[in-house]
Amino acid sequence: MHHYKLLKTGIIGSIVMMIFCFTPVSVLLFGALGLGAYVSGLDFGLLPLLGISFCLIVFALIKRQMNKATTS
């Protein structure tokens, strides 16, 4: 059952990171907060988090597949 939490966390994290990476949400948010100078450095933090989220999804799917193989 633990792999379902991993999968859900990975999917939610990926969706959130995609929203902030591929849409101007983060640019508008930082601009509204007066932090527009830091927008250029967002990719250095957001893209690795997106990669980690995708790795978490793959790990959870592999773990689920291994669990199905051992129970069958």
Image: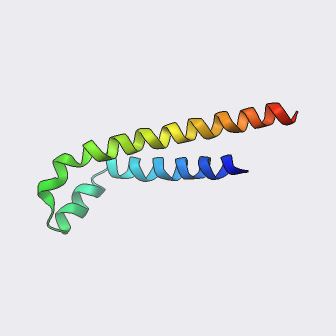
Q: Which is more toward the observer, 72 or 18?
A: 72
Find residue 7 and report its horizontal and vertical position in percent: 61, 47
Q: Quadrant of the C terminus?
A: top right
Find residue 47 and report its horizontal and vertical position in percent: 34, 41
Residue at the image position 19 percent from the left and 68 percent from the top = 32
Q: How many marks?
A: 0
Q: Which is more toward the observer, 66 or 12?
A: 66
Find residue 36 and report its horizontal and vertical position in percent: 14, 58
Q: Which is more toward the observer, 59 or 30?
A: 59
Q: Is residue 52 above or below residue 39?
A: above
Residue at the image position 79 percent from the left and 36 percent from the top = 68
Q: Is the image coloured rainbow, by chain, by secondary structure, or in one colour? A: rainbow
Q: Which residue is situated farthest in the right direction here?
A: 72
Residue at the image position 49 percent from the left and 39 percent from the top = 54
Residue 30 falls left or right of residue 6:
left
Q: Which residue is situated farthest in the left direction here?
A: 37
Residue 31 falls left or right of residue 46:
left
Residue 26 falls left or right of residue 38:
right
Residue at the image position 76 percent from the left and 37 percent from the top = 67
Residue 22 appears in which quarter of the rendering?
Answer: top left
